[in-house]
Image (cartoon, helix red, strand yellow):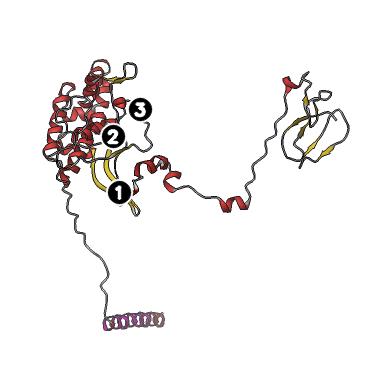
Amino acid sequence: MYFFVLPCNFRYLVWFPAFPGFVNTELWSSPVLAFACLRSCYFVFSCRAGLSVCLRYFLVSGLKQVFVKAQKSRAYSKRFQVKYKRRREGKTDYRARIRLINQDKNKYNTPKYRFVVRFTNKDITAQIISATITGDMVLASAYSHELPHYGLEAGLTNYAAAYCTGLLLARRVLKSLEMDSEYEGNVEATGEDFSIEPAETRRPFRALLDVGLLRTTTGNRVFGALKGALDGGLDIPHSEKRFAGFSKDSKQLDAEVHRKYIYGGHVSAYMSSLMEDEPEKYQSHFSEYIKKGIEPDDFEALYKKVHAAIRADPTLKKSDKPVPKEHKRFNLKKLTYEERKQKLIERLNALNSAAGEDEEEDDDE
């Protein structure tokens, strides 16, 4: 018998074009699987002991592959276990989360805090969170939409705004724990790497950076928020390799480049180039800056004022919401039994009088 074989444990009905009829080959216990060649008169010889191949046409034409639809049985569907909801929605990386919230067993119920940073199209969210059995507990939070209270009214999602949001959260959580006077952090942002040193009394507040599903590329805005939290006085394990301005070749952080990003220098440079090259695009792209009267040369002074205002009062500002207008109510008044009875009598009398008038009109006709 001439045919090509592959190791397998399936049952196949094999047809050889050179010979008439079919050959029914049962291979449940045999370690071979037979395939018919694509052309007649070109065969492959096989046996259990070895494999000798005739390559006259076989390598050129190959074997025809057959695709069969995978059939999922009822038993498969019954035993299928769905993943966590936030995994199905693509919101949580549980492999990273387990490593972020896992606590040493000799620390018992001591919370392990995470510095969580998330970005949307119009906002930046920074939170200090600890995990419990009942769910995550938020110790403090800060948002970039709070920055207009401190003087920053445009550009609330860039690297400089992320730095301000991280700084605001750090000062807010330290103030709530009455540690703001002990750990002032790095008051003047120079762009250099900074780590808080322990004081003689209380150790610094420690948290781990949680970036979620974000790509941790060099110069990402999440590291701007990290730098703001570090300068604000939080103890967060980190490396300077992902800050804006780090060179992969020299393996050093260029503090001047990083400082430029912290004070919005990259936005200022782009603003200036658009003003000269594309005035129409500048008018639409930086319309909010134009409304607020912010020029390219005003950025550094503006951000310095914002940083100082955050350090002066990081507490949450309550927004003055207008009191809702009181609307007239048109609910029907609930009647007593006597009133309902009287209304029924009046309706019956009206019906009887109407019927009597109709009869009189018929008699007149």
Q: Residue under circle 3?
A: 217
Q: Residues within 10 Å of mark 1 (few under 14, many from 20)?
A: few
Considering the numbered disc 1 on the image, is that residue within a helix, a strand or a loop? helix
Q: Is residue 134 above or below residue 161?
A: below
Identity of the amino acid at label 1?
Answer: Lys
Find residue 340 and report its horizontal and vertical position in percent: 29, 80
Residue stretch in magenta: 338-355
Q: Is residue 291 visible?
A: yes
Q: Nearer the viewer, residue 142 or 128?
A: 128
In the picture, the quarter occupied by the C terminus is: bottom left
Q: What number is the disc on residue 237?
A: 2
Position of 157 relative to 97 (above/below): above
Query: What residue is shown at x 41% (from left), y 40% (from top)?
Result: 93
Percent of width and height locating residue 295: 17, 23
Q: CA distance from mark 1 to mark 2?
A: 19 Å
Dot 3 falls on a residue whose secondary structure is loop
Looking at the image, which residue sits at the far right? Answer: 20
Question: Local crowd at mark 2 within 10 Å, few (<14), some, or many (≥20)?
Answer: few
Place residue 223 in its image quadrant: top left
Q: Earlier in the sequence, mark 3 or mark 1?
A: 1
- The picture places residue 128, in percent across and down from the top left corner, at 26, 43
On the question of residue 117 being in view, the answer is no
Is label 1 or label 2 in front? 1
What is the spatial separation of the Cα atoms under label 2 and label 3, in whole angstroms? 17 Å
Is residue 137 covered in magenta? no
Residue 342 within the magenta-colored segment of the rendering: yes
Residue ID for mark 1:
107
Q: Amino acid at mark 2?
A: Pro
Q: Residues within 10 Å of mark 3 (few under 14, many from 20)?
A: few
Residue type, numbered disc 3:
Thr
Q: Residue at x 27, y 77 (%)?
A: 335
